[in-house]
C-alpha cells in the first residue's frame, strides 16, 4: 500500500497543478463569445474607446466660446447689440483662458462624433467587387463603379472638430471693435467667418484590424487548453488582415502587414507542434498593438 501511495502522490500533485493551470483558460473559453457577431460588436466598441479618450480632452471653455459666437450672431440679427457684445466678451475671456493654458496649441478640439461603416463580406467577395469595379472603369461606367467603391469600407470614422487658436480669438475681438464702431453687418460677417474656420480631422480606424487584434487576444487565452480553437481564431485573424489589405488600409504599411501574417503562420505551426507559444503570442500582440496605433493617432488626409 505504501508503494502505491508513493507512486501515486507525484501524479496526484501534477494533476492538481494541471487543473489549476488549465481550468482558468477552459472557463475563459467557455464564457467568452468569439462568434463573428460578438467580435464585430466588440471591435466597434473598442474603436469607439478612442473617440471617448478624445472626448475627455475637449476644452469646455472653447466649446462655450463657440456656442457664444452663435448666440452673439443671433442677438445681432435681432438687433440686441449690447447683449451681443457682452456675450462676445465672455467668449474672448474663455479663449484667453485656453490660450494661457496652452500657448503653443494651434487647434483646440470642441466636438467629437463617430460614424461606423461595416462590410459583411469575405476576401473572395471583396476581390470580385474590386475586379468588377476595374472592369466598369475600363468601360467608362464611372458612376456604377463609384457606387460599388463606396461600399468597400469597414471602419469607424472619428470626426474631431477644432477651432484655430491663431485666428479665431482675434476674429472675435475684431468683431467687437466693429460693433463699437456701429459696423454691425461687418461684425456679423466676421463672426460667420470665425465659425466657418472650424476644421475637421477624421481619424479612420479599420475594423478588420481591430477584429484581428481581438481574435489574436482570444487565441492567446485558449492556446494551452484548446489547440484547435486557438488555430481557428488565428485563421480568422489572418482572414481579417487580408480583408484590411484588400480594402487598402495596409497600403502604407505593407512591410509590417507581411510581418504580422508571417508571425501568425509561425504561431500556428508552434501551437500544432510543441506549443511553446507564450513568447510568440506576446511578440505578436505587441506587434499588432503598434500596427493599430498607425490608424488611431493619424487623421485621414483630405
Image (cartoon, rainbow, N blue to C red):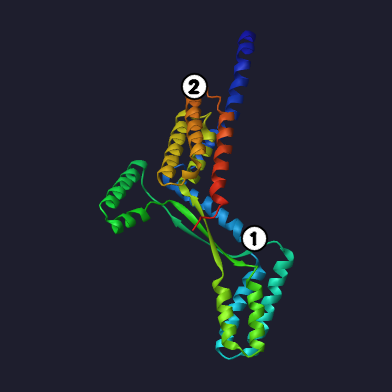
Residue at (25%, 52%) from the top-left corner? 139
Q: Residues within 10 Å of mark 1 (few under 14, many from 20)?
A: few
Q: Secondary structure at mark 2?
A: loop
Is 45 placed above or below 251 here? below
Q: Where residue 179 sits in the image (x, y, percent)?
A: 64, 87
The Cα atoms of the two marked residues, 2 and 1, are separated by: 48 Å
> Is residue 64 among what the camera can see?
no
Q: Residues within 10 Å of mark 2 (few under 14, many from 20)?
A: few
284 and 245: which is toward the camera: 245
Q: Where residue 78 sits in the image (x, y, percent)?
A: 56, 89
Q: Quadrant of residue 11?
A: top right
> Is residue 56 among what the camera can see?
yes
Is 134 placed above or below 92 here? above
Is 136 placed above or below 189 here? above
Q: Earlier in the sequence, mark 2 or mark 1?
A: 1
Residue at (50%, 26%) from the top-left corner? 271
Q: Identify residue for label 1.
A: 57
Label number found at residue 273: 2
- Label 1 near label 2: C-beta < 8 Å? no
147 and 47: which is toward the camera: 147
Is 152 placed above or below 85 here? above
Q: Where residue 279 sits in the image (x, y, percent)?
A: 59, 29
Q: Where residue 98 sits in the image (x, y, percent)?
A: 70, 68
211 and 296: which is toward the camera: 296
Q: Secondary structure at mark 1?
A: loop
The single residue placed furthest to the left in the displayed view is: 139
Q: Quadrant of the N terminus?
A: top right
268 and 149: which is toward the camera: 149
Amino acid at each position: 500500500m505504501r508503494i502505491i501511495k508513493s507512486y501515486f502522490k507525484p501524479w496526484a500533485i501534477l494533476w492538481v497543478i494541471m487543473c489549476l493551470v488549465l481550468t482558468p483558460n477552459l472557463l475563459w473559453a467557455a464564457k467568452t463569445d468569439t462568434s463573428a457577431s460578438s467580435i464585430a460588436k466588440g471591435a466597434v466598441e473598442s474603436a469607439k474607446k478612442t473617440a471617448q479618450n478624445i472626448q475627455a480632452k475637449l476644452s469646455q471653455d472653447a466649446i462655450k466660446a463657440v456656442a457664444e459666437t452663435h448666440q452673439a450672431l443671433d442677438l445681432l440679427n435681432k438687433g440686441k447689440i449690447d447683449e451681443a457684445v457682452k456675450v462676445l466678451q465672455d467668449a474672448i475671456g474663455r479663449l484667453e483662458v485656453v490660450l494661457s493654458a496652452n500657448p503653443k496649441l494651434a487647434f483646440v478640439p470642441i466636438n467629437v462624433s463617430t460614424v461606423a461603416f461595416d462590410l459583411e463580406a469575405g476576401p473572395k467577395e471583396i476581390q470580385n467587387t474590386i475586379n468588377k469595379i476595374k472592369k466598369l472603369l475600363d468601360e467608362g461606367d464611372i458612376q456604377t463603379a463609384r457606387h460599388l467603391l463606396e461600399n468597400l469600407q469597414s471602419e469607424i470614422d472619428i470626426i474631431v472638430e477644432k477651432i484655430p487658436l491663431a485666428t479665431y480669438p482675434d476674429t472675435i475681438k475684431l468683431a467687437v471693435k466693429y460693433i463699437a464702431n456701429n459696423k454691425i453687418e461687418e461684425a456679423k460677417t466676421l463672426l460667420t467667418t470665425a465659425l466657418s474656420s472650424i476644421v475637421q480631422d477624421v481619424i479612420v480606424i479599420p475594423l478588420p484590424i481591430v477584429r484581428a487584434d481581438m481574435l489574436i487576444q482570444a487565441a492567446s487565452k485558449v492556446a494551452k487548453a484548446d489547440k484547435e480553437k486557438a488555430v481557428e481564431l488565428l485563421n480568422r485573424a489572418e482572414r481579417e488582415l487580408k480583408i484590411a489589405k484588400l480594402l487598402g488600409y495596409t497600403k502604407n504599411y505593407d512591410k509590417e502587414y507581411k510581418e504580422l501574417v508571417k508571425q501568425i503562420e509561425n504561431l500556428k505551426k508552434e501551437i500544432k507542434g510543441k506549443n511553446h507559444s507564450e513568447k510568440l503570442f506576446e511578440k505578436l500582440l505587441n506587434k499588432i498593438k503598434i500596427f493599430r496605433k498607425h490608424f488611431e493617432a493619424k487623421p485621414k488626409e483630405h
